[in-house]
Amino acid sequence: MKIGKVLAATVVAAMMTAAPASAAVLSIGTDGKLMGASGVIVAGKSYDVVFAKGTCNQVFGACDASAFAFNTWQSARMAAQALLDQVFLDTVVNGKIHAFDTDPALTNGCTNKSTCTGIIPFFISDLIIDGSQYMEGMSVINNKDNMYDEAGGIAGVFSTSSFQGNDNITYVRFTSTATAVPEPATWALMLAGSGMIGGMMRRRNRVRVTFA
């Protein structure tokens, strides 16, 4: 009985360690460009991601905080880190190598071979310069040399106009898919509960067993 409990505890612990960090599904264009991804997990929630050029209004539909998936620099920074951990990766799809980590120019909106900076807007600033409104955004830097990758430690202030003239900057649009991913502790409770129910059923079955 004690051995069974130890084994059960070991299984639960192992499942907690391995409990699901869902793999993001990358969206790759016919030209081999990284267009975005689906199933990117940020703070336990799933998001679809798109990399796009254009003005803030064009990319987000409206350049307003209500159109942004994140509204604080802390949450935007978590989103930036999620891109480094789950999206900007060298991977193999259908037998073909896609160097989305070591070749920043493969990210849609970027053509610079050294670095690509994604901008995640989270707040519209009151700052207006020469008729152009500015916003606060978190930057995620994907550099061909991994030691310089960064999930924007400092939020920057950027113009809401297009980054069309920059070969190393692109907007990043996150859209919630309203799918919550259970935290490891939640998985552990679910597993423990299933184990208890299974044990009760087994005990019940043993009681009902009769021998002729």
Image (cartoon, rainbow, N blue to C red):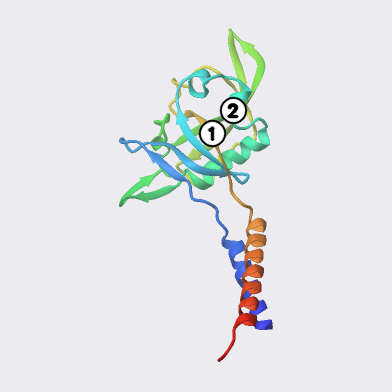
Which of the marked residues, 2 or 1, is nearer the chain's N terminus?
Answer: 2
Whether residue 148 is visible, yes or no, is: no
Q: Residue 200 at x, y = what percent? A: 66, 73
Q: Which residue is mark 2?
A: 68
Q: Which mark is residue 198?
A: none
Q: Is residue 167 left or right of residue 194?
A: left
Q: Residue 48 at x, y = what percent? A: 50, 37
Residue at the spot x=65%, y=37% of the render? Answer: 75
Whether residue 79 is visible, yes or no, is: yes
Residue at the spot x=62%, y=41% of the render? Answer: 78
Q: Which mark is residue 174?
A: 1
Q: Residue 5 at x, y = what percent? A: 67, 77
| Relative vertical location of residue 107 with respect to residue 14 in this rendering, above or below | above
Quadrant of the drawing holding the N terminus: bottom right
Tell me the element at label 1: strand
| Relative vertical location of residue 59 with respect to residue 97 in this rendering, above or below | above
Quadrant of the drawing holding the C terminus: bottom right
Q: Residue 132 at x, y = what percent? A: 57, 11
Q: Residue furthest bottom?
A: 212
Q: Amino acid at mark 2?
A: Phe
Q: Residues within 10 Å of mark 1 (few under 14, many from 20)?
A: many
Q: Residue furthest top?
A: 131
- Marks 2 and 1: CB-CB under 8 Å? yes
Judge by depth and name the residue closer to the eye, 204 or 6: 204
Cα distance, mark 2 to mark 1? 7 Å
Q: Amino acid at mark 1?
A: Phe
Judge by depth and name the residue closer to the eye, 174 or 81: 174
